Amino acid sequence: MRVLCVGENASCGRPTEGLSRAAIAGSFSLSTGEASGIVETLRRSHYDIVVVQQSSSDVRIVRQIRKGKISAPIIVMRQNGTDEGEVDLFTAGADDCVAENTDHNVLLARLRAVIRRAGGHDSPTLHIGRLHVGIERREVHIDSTVVPLTRKEYDLFVLLAMRKTQVLSKEVLLDSLYSGEDEPFGKVIDVMICKIRKKIRAFGIREPFTTQWGIGYRLNETAFAPVTVTLPKDDYHVRPSVRENCIPVLSGINMLEVSTPGERI
């Protein structure tokens, strides 16, 4: 998860203690940016969410982002604010508003919840056919078995799962996985995809990712469809019912003796 923190001035642009602690607890990448060039920053680099820090309710930064046609979710952190100001922020395009002194665990949960909803997911567990991704526990299951992924492999897999309808370029994946770190060579994404494919194929899933050459990768949602059982062809025919001949049994039947010639009955 990549988070961009921006403020209305230099002092508000520094991450608060709560946000910094949330970044440590959630192991996510936290970057800072200036309000004056926020739209260009968001166009140039991929961020999962924007945190706008303010001393009081101010819709200018939120409006600037939305007028720039940036769809990234926005959380506003305020030192002080009124209900009317909160309404204005939501109307301008904010996705959530929190107080600056919000506990870092609560803030982390809200960040994750807003990102999930922005990606079309309403649960902390993603369900895609046989695939189950536990966001909070950082585990990937196929059926009921854990897929043994490394930390970076998990982060890459979740990025593709959260945006299962999108093709993500190698640049976006590198930027998301290694922001603030020394980025490795460009082929590292290809190598990680190859390793994840090998682990997923052990579960009978042949092609978990779709490769679009020169563009990037996308999760192959249909590959995780539940396994269906095909019946033998003969079982599709309705077997004819057995026809039974029912001979009625009559009560009071008199058994007649058969007489021999010349014998009188």
Image (tube, rainbow, N blue to C red):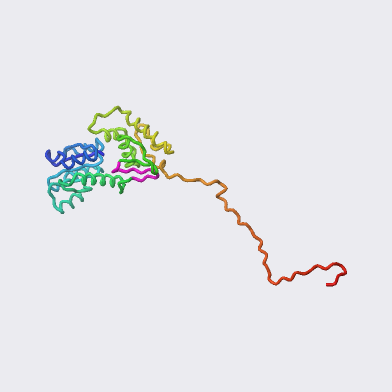
- 235 or 244, which is in the foreground? 244
Q: In this view, does 233 lie above or below 216?
A: below
- Do we see residue 133 in this rendering? yes
Give coordinates of residue 97: x percent, y percent. 19, 48
Give coordinates of residue 105: x percent, y percent. 21, 45
Q: Quadrant of residue 65?
A: top left
- Quadrant containing the C terminus is bottom right
- 86 or 239, which is in the foreground? 239
Give coordinates of residue 67: x percent, y percent. 22, 44
**Given the current orientation, which residue lies at the most extreme top position?**
185
**Given the current orientation, which residue lies at the most extreme right position?**
262
Give coordinates of residue 142: x percent, y percent. 39, 42
Which residue: 72% across, 70% down? 253
Which residue: 57% across, 51% down? 237
Q: In which quarter of the image is residue 43?
A: top left
Q: Is residue 63 above or below residue 189?
A: below
- Do we see residue 66 in this rendering? no
Left/right placement of residue 167 relative to residue 66 reads right
Tally of marks = 0
Left/right placement of residue 200 relative to residue 241 reads left
Residue 130 in magenta? Answer: yes
Which residue: 16% across, 48% down? 99
Residue 50 in magenta? Answer: no
Left/right placement of residue 172 relative to residue 60 reads right
Q: Give the range drawn in magenta.
A: 126-137
